[in-house]
């Protein structure tokens, strides 16, 4: 009998009899680990295709439905983020107890279906309800995925593994840009066709996931740890008591406030500020930038932290903080240069540098948390991140742009609104630097707690 099997049996509790699928008890091969990581990364890519598509199609939707910037801000931000954020906690509670593969497959089917339904919306209210539906589905994506990856990969490889998983963000955004560019004709195609086309393939991926991925043994390299399920209040109290967990949480949240706002409004800004541009060509270029610079930044962030952290765990805060020191001025200049090409070059730097915080932050959320609340750790992280970042960033810029446009016009109004994003970037830098001062002790405490 393998060590893994023995550990799984010794830690078994009556509540685990409720698992709906057999637990994989034999040692897993490296090829299988990589396969699962690739599949979950594809799921995450579909997550961001469906999340990002409204920002890409924003000028077409706004023109078709006659919406102002404030209304678009609500659609891009809080309407999606509210249910996505609120439901993340109870879904993570389920993921810490029941079959995570099933939860991901069902969630993927729901959010893909609602993305397709968005293409059938004929008015603002219908589109808002569909966006809320997408948020409901996507709530069940990342917490169980993070938990599975953490069970399959050891601590010293976890930042790299979760950085690869995080590549779903730039690759998903890239595919959303490319799909839109391919489907529209002359910049005036029906945006509804794009919504339908990017939503339906997610259902097929959910079937592949369900048929080919098995539920892993919980605990991974901490398989001998106590896996007795704990009440939500106790899990919350434990996570709130870890200083660097909160520093990382605020760092990624403020950074995402700015990045989500940029991602959902940059196309609108370029269309307004650079009249006469080739819309399809812009989409292709933005897709390439996201699929190369942003993806490289996500990967580099994880690799740097895994290597640097062998000497000092401070790397988990210093690498993201230093990278954002580069990203912030580059973004400010990108808004005010006259040349579109110069702005795109600066945006390339922004995406590369700001992508670096994803893998290290996700890894820290898993490693610092007790094994039995790993999914809850990710869910609480995403609760704070998405209330502040996803819900706040796009909505804040939309409301501010609408207010500024009355006196400054639509171009300068949006430019001024996006300029305010320097503030959350600076707050993110400060939070990550503070995290670097606390993480060594918290890491030691986590190792003692998890065994």
Image (tube, rainbow, N blue to C red):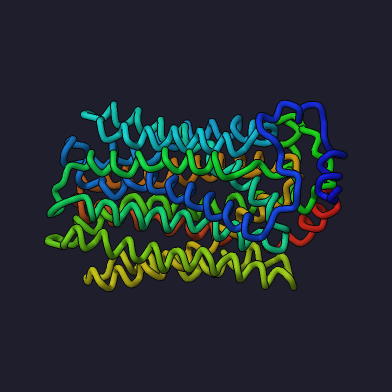
The percent position of residue 105, horizontal first and vertical second, equals: 52, 37
427 over 336 or under it: above or below: above
- Residue at the image point whose x is 67% and y is 72% from the top: 307
Q: How many marks?
A: 0
Comparing 215 with 383, the one in front is: 215
208 over 276 or under it: above or below: above
Comparing 312 with 366, the one in front is: 366
Comparing 326 with 188, the one in front is: 188
Q: Is residue 72 left or right of residue 218?
A: left
The percent position of residue 377, horizontal first and vertical second, equals: 66, 43
165 over 20 or under it: above or below: below
Q: Is residue 24 left or right of residue 80?
A: right
Q: Quadrant of residue 308?
A: bottom right
- Residue at the image point whose x is 64% and y is 31% from the top: 94
The percent position of residue 320, horizontal first and vertical second, equals: 57, 64
The percent position of residue 292, horizontal first and vertical second, equals: 41, 68
Q: Quadrant of residue 154?
A: bottom right
- Residue at the image point whose x is 28% and y is 65% from the top: 285
- Residue at the image point whose x is 29% and y is 69% from the top: 343
Asked whether the viewer can see residue 431, the reply is no
Comparing 214 with 83, the one in front is: 214
């Amino acid at each position: 009998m393998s060590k893994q099997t023995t550990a799984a049996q010794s830690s078994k509790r009556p509540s685990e009899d409720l698992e709906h699928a057999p637990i994989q008890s034999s040692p897993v091969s490296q090829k299988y680990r990589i396969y699962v990581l690739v599949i979950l990364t594809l799921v995450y890519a579909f997550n961001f295709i469906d999340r990002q598509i409204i920002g890409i199609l924003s000028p077409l939707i706004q023109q078709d439905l006659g919406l102002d910037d404030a209304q678009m801000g609500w659609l891009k931000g809080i309407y999606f983020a509210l249910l996505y954020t609120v439901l993340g906690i109870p879904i993570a509670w389920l993921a810490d107890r029941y079959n995570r593969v099933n939860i991901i497959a069902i969630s993927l089917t729901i959010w893909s279906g609602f993305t397709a339904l968005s293409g059938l919306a004929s008015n603002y209210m219908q589109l808002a309800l569909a966006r809320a539906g997408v948020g409901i589905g996507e709530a069940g994506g990342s917490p169980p995925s993070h938990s599975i990856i953490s069970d399959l990969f050891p601590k010293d490889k976890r930042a790299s593994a979760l950085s690869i998983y995080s590549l779903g963000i730039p690759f998903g955004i890239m595919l959303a840009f490319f799909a839109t560019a391919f489907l529209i004709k002359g910049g005036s195609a029906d945006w509804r066709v794009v919504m339908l086309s990017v939503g339906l393939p997610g259902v097929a991926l959910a079937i592949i996931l369900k048929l080919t991925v098995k539920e892993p043994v919980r605990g991974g390299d901490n398989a001998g740890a106590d896996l007795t399920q704990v009440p939500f209040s106790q899990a919350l109290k434990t996570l709130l008591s870890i200083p660097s967990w909160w520093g990382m949480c605020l760092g990624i949240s403020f950074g995402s406030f700015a990045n989500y706002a940029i991602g959902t409004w940059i196309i609108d800004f370029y269309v307004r500020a650079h009249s006469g541009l080739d819309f399809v060509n812009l989409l292709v270029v933005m897709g390439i930038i996201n699929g190369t610079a942003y993806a490289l930044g996500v990967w580099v962030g994880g690799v740097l932290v895994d290597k640097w952290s062998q000497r000092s765990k401070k790397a988990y805060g210093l690498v993201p903080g230093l990278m954002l020191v580069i990203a912030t001025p580059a973004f400010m200049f990108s808004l005010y240069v006259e040349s579109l090409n110069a702005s795109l070059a600066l945006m390339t730097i922004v995406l590369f540098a700001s992508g670096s915080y994803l893998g290290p932050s996700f890894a820290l959320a898993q490693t610092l948390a007790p094994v039995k609340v790993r999914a809850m750790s990710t869910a609480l992280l995403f609760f704070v991140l998405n209330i502040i970042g996803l819900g706040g960033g796009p909505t804040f810029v939309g409301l501010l742009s609408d207010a500024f446009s009355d006196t400054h016009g639509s171009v300068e109004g949006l430019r001024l609104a996006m300029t305010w994003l320097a503030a959350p970037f600076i707050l993110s830098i400060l939070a990550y630097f503070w995290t670097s001062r606390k993480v060594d002790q918290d890491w030691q405490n986590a190792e003692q707690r998890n065994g």
